[in-house]
């Protein structure tokens, strides 16, 4: 009788301790060969939320926590293997990681640890969700970065090789003054492309390593836009484009001059790339936004939706190369200066990029 009373006191004490601890716990006993769950602590009810009526046995727990048949079987097999390994190594506990489905349908990663005290099984759930999700996020980021750098390396080689070929032709060959002028134009266009790619790469690296500092100042919008258009003048003339700038409704803006210049330069460069010869581009600054509107080839809606997480690129209307890095950089830089990039586009009818500050 005394032993039975001691056991009851031990159960009560164990339940009290479990309710005090900050982790979800299941306390179970094997009674007449059946693995019965006898207590769920307060943290378990709060976080995972099943009741004893819903998971009275270990089998019921498995069915609720792992509703996918294949994944449930995988978890059970892994657990059985860990139990075998623990017995072989003389350990008093078993642990394994699994993706648990909570009562509200959400899924969380836990490291599940179990130990046996006489015939009582104590199972603790250590939340790994944030840690594992962060690891997955870092893996995805690294995959995107590797892909972007691969694309960048490929696209930098092309214009540099072209520069070498064009300059060699100018040095070694007998060419007329007219041909020499055309060669110079090609060199200028290729140099501008390489410089843009290098600028974007440097700023992307700064952004990703958190070394891009923000310096706010009052910016003369008209002067900034004129300077940006001037750097693209050769390409604009080569494609016979009309570029209109209207900034009378925004005299100045308080922002970071370098970052704002990079953003607008990329938007203009993109508009030039995807606007065919004799097309038109307009840059408008008014209210709290600067927009770049073109009459180019536009984009389908699916492409617009994928721009925020896709480094893919496509050829321009004159077969211009690109990395897809420009718009990625613009989206991230816009956030840095408390702005947002809104994209409106229709295939074959043009694109409007709006930087709202």
Image (cartoon, rainbow, N blue to C red):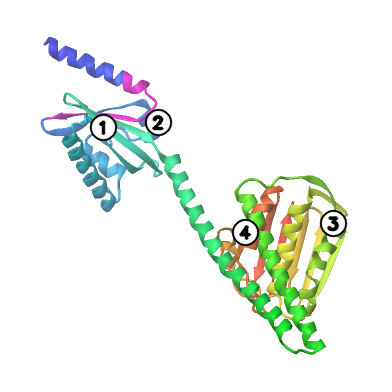
Element class at badge 4: helix
Give the position of the N terminus as an image quadrant: top left
Q: Position of residue 130 (x, y in %)?
A: 45, 40
Q: Residue at x 17, y 35 (%)?
A: 87
The percent position of residue 82, horizontal first and vertical second, equals 22, 40
Residue 10 visible, this angle: yes
Residue drawn 77% across and 71% down? 281
* Residue on which the image places disc 1: 114
Disc 3 designates what residue?
221
Visible in this render: residue 300? no
Q: Earlier in the sequence, mark 1 or mark 3?
A: 1
Mark 2–mark 3 distance (CA, rounded to whole Å): 55 Å
Q: Position of residue 166 (x, y in %)?
A: 69, 80
Query: Which residue is located at x 73 percent, y 78 percent?
Result: 186
- Drawn side of residue 185 relative to residue 307, left or right: right
- Reply yes or no: does residue 62 show up in magenta: no
> Which residue, given by chain and number where applicable, does mark 4 sit on?
328
The boundaries of the magenta stretch are 17-31
Of discs 2 and 4, which sits in the foreground?
A: 4
Q: Residues within 10 Å of mark 4 (few under 14, many from 20)?
A: some
The span from disc 2 to disc 4 (Cα, nearest Å) is 41 Å
């Amino acid at each position: 009788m005394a032993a039975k009373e001691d056991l009851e006191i031990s159960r009560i004490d164990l339940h009290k301790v479990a309710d005090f601890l900050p982790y979800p716990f299941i306390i179970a006993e094997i009674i007449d060969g059946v693995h019965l769950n006898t207590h769920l602590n307060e943290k378990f009810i709060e976080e995972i939320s099943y009741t004893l009526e819903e998971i009275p046995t270990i089998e019921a727990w498995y069915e609720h926590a792992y509703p996918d048949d294949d994944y449930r079987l995988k978890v059970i097999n892994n657990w059985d293997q860990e139990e075998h390994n623990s017995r072989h190594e003389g350990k008093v506990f078993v642990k394994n990681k699994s993706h648990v489905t909570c009562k509200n349908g959400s899924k969380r990663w836990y490291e599940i640890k179990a130990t046996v005290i006489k015939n009582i099984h104590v199972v603790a759930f250590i939340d790994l969700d944030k840690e594992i999700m962060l690891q997955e996020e870092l893996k995805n980021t690294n995959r995107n970065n590797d892909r972007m750098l691969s694309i960048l390396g490929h696209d930098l080689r092309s214009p540099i090789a072209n520069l070498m070929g064009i300059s060699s032709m100018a040095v070694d060959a007998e060419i007329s003054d007219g041909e020499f002028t055309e060669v110079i134009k090609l060199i200028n266009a290729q140099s501008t492309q390489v410089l843009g790619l290098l600028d974007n790469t440097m700023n992307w690296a700064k952004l990703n390593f958190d070394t891009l500092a923000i310096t706010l100042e009052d910016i003369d919008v008209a002067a900034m836009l004129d300077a940006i258009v001037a750097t693209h003048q050769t390409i604009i003339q080569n494609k016979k484009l009309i570029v209109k700038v209207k900034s009378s409704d925004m005299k100045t803006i308080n922002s970071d001059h370098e970052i704002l210049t990079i953003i607008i330069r990329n938007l203009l460069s993109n508009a030039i790339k995807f606007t065919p010869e004799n097309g038109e581009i307009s840059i408008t600054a008014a209210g709290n936004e600067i927009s770049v509107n073109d009459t180019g080839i536009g984009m389908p809606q699916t492409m617009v939706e994928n721009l925020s997480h896709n480094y893919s690129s496509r050829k321009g209307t004159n077969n211009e190369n690109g990395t897809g890095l420009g718009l990625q950089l613009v989206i991230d830089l816009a956030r840095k200066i408390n702005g947002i990039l809104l994209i409106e586009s229709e295939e074959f009818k043009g694109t409007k990029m709006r930087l709202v500050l």
